[in-house]
Image (cartoon, rainbow, N blue to C red):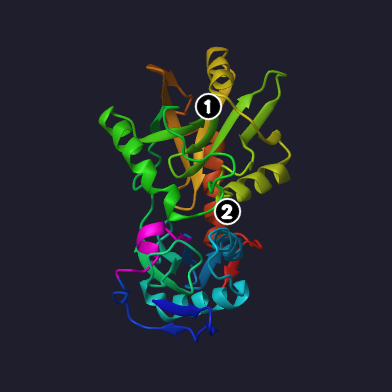
Amino acid sequence: MLEIDWSQKSGWEKPTIHEFANLNLSPASVVFRYGSECFEGLKAYKDKNGEIRMFRPMKNMDRLYLSAERLALPTFDKNEVLECMKKLVKIDSSWIPRERGYSLYIRPTLIATQDTLGVGPSAKAKFFTIMSPVGPYFKSGFAPVSLVADNRYARAWPGGVGSFKVGGNYAPCIKPQLEAATRGYHQNLWLFGEELTEVGTMNCFVFWKNENGERELITPHLDGTILPGVTRDSILTLTREWKEFKVTEGRVTMSQLIRAIKENRLIEMFGAGTACIVCPIERINYKGIDYKIPIDENLKAGKLTKRLMDTILAIQYGEVDHEWSIKL
């Protein structure tokens, strides 16, 4: 693991890489009460030649920096921290699986460590990174998910921290997730009022024929309540380059979605994130009614969902030359 301490007095200390070990923290550390922590999630891959690759890692550093800034945690030199993480990955490269679909998950975290009961900016902080090998999100082909859209709960709200990767965005979502599971659904479709925001911990995409008859891929716009996902940005960039249909960052409501379903204009719908890349959606429950989302029964996903999965995997594993695949 990688560990770097910071203090208001001395700034960032020398990074250390050592075997995985428990942290030595005071029970009075600020992080334990006020949630002063942010984190990231990214992966390292081995291509067919055994070369180590990372997928757009600077995007994660950019987001971690903004999260730290929002929580009044110390900011950092993004390039230097990324170089430290690359060195860690190289040292532990034997833990990176060789099979396609497998990878080494990397979890950088920044926490406030000053031992005080007061609420305020922490005079001490710790950055650390741990890693673990992970297998494919879908072990035997796609497994489409069912969702509960319940506007009793909001994942984020205007002026809050929904666009930052902070722990406080996740713990409050566990209870609604458990409620969805007890009703036989996999995840929540997060709403703000009637507006679609995110799917579980993923960004949300709708592919439909809009009311003007145009094929359109639309995802909720970054209004401060949406996490600016790296996969989200990659999908928007790729589909805009394809120039095969309209690509929009905008507003989608449940009323619009239900109308599209009833008028047979909805083509497919999926979530997107680092863990799964893309996750097909087959059913949404809203106000006690189940709405079926179209999927290809052979693929267990929509055709666009499958194409995006194949395209991004090919980039991540270096099967095609692309600037997003960074060779270590």
Q: Along the line of sight, which residue is nearer the eye, 270 or 190?
A: 190
Q: Decide if residue 6 is on the left or right side of residue 19.
A: right
Q: Which residues are magenta?
A: 27-39
Which residue is label 1 attached to?
193
- In this view, the residue farthest toward the left is 182
Q: Mark 2: which amino acid? A: Val
The disc at residue 29 is none
Q: What residue do we see at 71% from left, 36% from top?
A: 244
Classed neighbour count for the residue bearing mark 2: other residues with Cα under 10 Å, few (<14), some (14–19), many (≥20): many
Which residue is label 2 attached to?
230
Q: CA distance from mark 1 to mark 2?
A: 26 Å
Does residue 37 show up magenta in the picture? yes
Q: Which badge, 1 or 2, comes first in the chain's sequence? A: 1
The kind of secondary structure element at disc 1 is loop
Q: What residue do we see at 35% from left, 62% from top?
A: 32
Classed neighbour count for the residue bearing mark 1: other residues with Cα under 10 Å, few (<14), some (14–19), many (≥20): some
Does residue 10 show up magenta in the picture? no
240 versus 212 height, above or below? below
